[in-house]
Image (cartoon, rainbow, N blue to C red):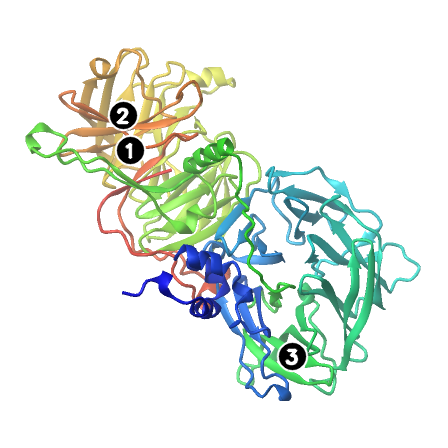
Amino acid sequence: MTMMSDLSKDLVEEILSKAPITSLGAVRSTSKQWNASSKDRLLCKAEPREQYLRFMVMDHRFLSMTFNLHGILKGDGEVFVRPSIKEVGDIVNQIDISKVFHCDGLVSCVANDNSSLVVWNPYLGQTKWIEAREPHDESDMFALGYDKNHKILRLYDEYYNYKFYNLKTESWGEEDYLPGWDIDSYNRGVALNGNTYFLTQEQRAKDKYRVYLLCFDFTTETFGEFLAMPFKYHRKYIGTLSCVGKEKLAALYQRWDTGEMAIWVTTKIESNEVLWRNLFKVDMEPLIRFGFQYCRDEAGSFFIDEEKKLAVVFNLDRKSDKRTKKKRCYHTAYIVGEKGYLRKVVLGEAVEVREGVYRSALVCSSSYVPSLEKINQIEEEEEEDKKRKRKSKRLCSMKFNLHGILNEDGLEFVVPSIKEVGILLNNRVEISKVFYCAGLLLCVTKDELRLVVWNPYLGQTRWINTKTTTGVPIYALGCDNNKNHKILSFFYDRSSYEIYDFKSDSWRAFNVMPNWYMDWYRQGTSLDGNTYFWTRERKKGYDSDEDEDTSPYFLICFDFTAERFGKLLDLPFTLDFVSEDNGILYCVKEEKLAALYQQFDTTMIEIWITTKIEPNAVSWTPFLKVDIEPLLGHYFQFNEDDCCFFIDEEKKLAVVIHADGFVEGKIICRTTSFIIGENGYLKKVNLGEETYDYPLVCSYVPSSVQINQIAGSEGRGNKRKRKSKGKGRPAGRDLTNKV
């Protein structure tokens, strides 16, 4: 049998040359020999020099584009090969991308909703998600660079202010002021030798047409001096930058009134000095049409082949549909040479951002070369700390098999199986809360700024921006009698609530003067499309929180059909805040509610289940009562804020999942499940490693509800199909999910 180690070096190089650069992460894991050879991937003799690989964002998708300029000139003797465009990066393409910036093998991407920033090393397959101190604005500009460490520059407030993020320390620097010049929002910077160069104009300058080059030095973390450009500038003219290898800058300039396009390249470039030479000029008017102008929106993109004296210019080409009379836009590449040679390549139809508005493709200014830079290198102790934090925000599936837990079964107990699920969610954001409703999961991001509704069975997600920037709202997912799904959002201390309607893709506000008070840390429980919450009656004539604390707890239902809260419903026990008694709710097979109760001064646990449950009526019956003192000791108590449970009604068993708050003197949670039966039977099961948060658990039954079949902003998903990120579908059985 021929082994991989038996293959000749020439054959390995031939194989590597045909593997897409963005797939090298998988290639590296094949063998040690392939790992070593792949590091010299671009030096393989089978690699054509004229093949350019660049990353691009087109219609919010992150793509790789291989542009082969063989055969573009008559003397090549070869046929021109159309560019190959592929969607890459499962991790990055879980979000819509609005901005991309490439720097020496690393790529920074900004989410279209301006809520996320991620740095990605495609070669190593590493990503680093960066939390913002505040939401980004659509006009904010980002650049990636380095000294000894990689950093991100952010320009904001119309580019009068800037700050930078250090990837090693994982912190944002202090705000600084950008005096004396203007940077246009559509003029992206270009990375070269770890620094970033921008086109800028001096404020209040005597010569208003003078344009300069400005360098941000990531070592000194300051902007340099004004550097000369080889042309003057006007708002109606176009000027933009690109890279030539790792050593030079290129500048494209087009005059609107003449159609002349000129390409310049640097002969010397430093942070405080630059020299230019003209590569070629061409009149675009006879080649295309009078009035053709390079796209201002996002400054378009271009790259050059200095040896062939060619430029590939990306633009939007607008055409009118003869049948519908409607204008349509196409992403187009124009290949222009010094002798006026032109080839037009249509890359695909552009998606409408909003009515009549399109975005030009954003192509990274420099060709992609793999990097061995590890963007997730941190100290061992910090790594353990970060692992705990990540585990605290994971979404997991947990199979809990209660066969064999009772002696008469004659079977051995099976330890619960816990697996991380949902690549769509976990590699992208940290989840702080999860809410289950009829096969759908509502997940709240750690920063409380975004929601995602996920159907694990169909592999569909729907991202929703909240209208809240401060406070910690309470969320719930439900549906009305017509199976229209909705999200409830409200604050425990405000006299209003909001409802998001999936069908209309919008939020609506409601005012209410409640006669009840709700704890912010208590989640609701979904049943039959509605949500039930713990609440306390607000006493008339009493204004202090102390008086409200003595009020007993009730249940209250939010009816998603009527879109309002119902009346207060009795619990089968008396529970108030001051006594420090504990009560926990659970849904039984989406038909009943179960309530666990434990008094603070006793070790007796009671569990009740409903015999009737409606928005305005409830009745209860006892299910289980057991004293846990002989099993766990006199001082052991389950707390509602670090505990959840579920029951097996047939076996008369309850599984209580509890988090111990201290491990070896540290505030670290160790999650444990306690299996309790009517005869006091108990089994204690450790559910895994330590984290920093308490578990949230819900039962799961698959659903075929389509959560992305709507109009509006989600309609774009129907215009361009994406590959399903979900692999396989869960069987139709109960699963328990844990955050």
Pick the quarter of the image with the N terminus. Answer: bottom left
Amino acid type at circle 3 is Ile
Residue 300, quarter of picture: bottom right
- Nearer the observer: mark 1 or 3; the answer is 3
- Which residue is labeled 2 in the image? 596
- The residue located at (58%, 58%) in the rendering is 98
Instruction: Tell me if 202 is positioned left or right of 506 in this view.
Output: right
- Which residue is labeled 1 in the image? 586
Amino acid type at circle 2 is Leu
Mark yes or no: residue 343 visible: yes
Where's residue 167, x and y in %?
Answer: 60, 42
Above or below for 75 versus 501: below
SS state under label 1: strand
- The residue located at (52%, 68%) in the rendering is 44
Mark yes or no: residue 261 visible: no
Label 2 environment density (alpha carbons within 10 Å; few <14, some 14–19, many ≥20): many
Residue 721, quarter of picture: bottom left
Amino acid type at circle 1 is Tyr
SS state under label 2: strand
Cα gap from disc 2 to disc 3, whole angstroms: 71 Å
Above or below for 213 versus 702: below
- Which residue is labeled 3 in the image? 335
